[in-house]
Amino acid sequence: MTDASNNPRHPVARNAIALGVIALLGTALLAWVNSATKPRIAEQERRQLLDQLEQVVPADRFNNAMHEDFILVSDTLAFPGGQQAQVFRARQQGVPAAVAMKFYAIDGYNGRIDLIVGILADGQVSGVRVLQHRETPGLGDGIELRRSDWILSFNGRSLDNTAAEDWTVQRDGGDFDQFTGATITPRAVVRAVHRALEYFEENQEALFSRPSEFAASEEAER
Ligand SMILES: Cc1cc2nc3c(=O)[nH]c(=O)nc-3n(C[C@H](O)[C@H](O)[C@H](O)COP(=O)(O)O)c2cc1C
């Protein structure tokens, strides 16, 4: 008796070889598609990041490649839940001008609310945007700019012009509007922005002086 696996003319062996060839071709095709689309995806991500940064730090405030000038920081109070905040640095002729911090509030009604917060070097908020959330449509989603202009109420706020006890919703005696029937969501965002401002004030010098982690992150991507 002949062993089918050793005889290439046997139908079983022929099928096995054909399957092997198809699998190899499939793998090669996938690898090719992956390498062909990788630069385009990276470019899309870069544009999206630039757009986010410029929404919270006006483009005329800086002339460095802000999207490539960032560090990762952790702080259990300002950035709870074991997260690392990404701090992008804006500089004008090399002089610190502003930061944009990407991090999340952990205490939304439905969990995490991803934010980007722009802070000018003088400690004033230049813009806040919600990047992602799972709050209830019609109740908690007023934090999105496309639903309401509530998020713009942070513009120009600072620790100097807004006392610590005012950094909450009006229902708790603070300065910020809540939404009808939804206090939890705006409360979480206001507190998160306040903590980010405090962190910035306490760490401003170190935030601008640490070397960028961009090169290391690019290396890790490869
Ligand atoms: C199905 C459902 C979804 C809700 N979604 C939200 C939400 O996304 N954000 C929010 O702040 N409150 C939401 N609420 C209301 C909260 O439970 C709470 O009543 C409201 O935020 C007022 O909180 P307060 O009593 O602390 O002012 C939701 C309630 C229900 C029943």
Image (cartoon, helix red, strand yellow):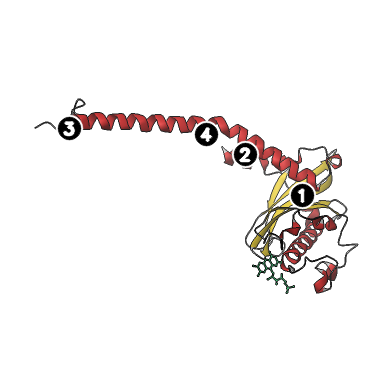
Foreground mark, 2 or 3, reads 3
What residue would you read off at disc 1? 100
Occupied quadrant, residue 22: top left
Left or right of residue 61: residue 46: left
Q: Which structural element holds mark 3?
A: helix
> Could you tell me which residue is drawn at 82 percent across and 65 percent down?
177
Mark toward the viewer: 3 or 1 = 3
Residue 170 quadrant: bottom right
Image region (quadrant) for ligand 1: bottom right
* Marks 3,1: beta carbons within 8 A: no
**Which amino acid, by three-letter code, is at mark 2?**
Glu
Tally of numbered discs: 4
Front-most of residues 201 and 49: 49
What crowding class fits label 4: few (fewer than 14 Cα within 10 Å), some (14-19), or many (20 or more)?
few
At x 58% / y 40%, what residue is drawn? 221
Distance Cα–Cα, label 1 vs label 4:
31 Å
Query: Is residue 87 shown above or below 199?
Result: above
Residue under numbered circle 4: 34
Q: Is residue 174 left or right of residue 219?
A: right
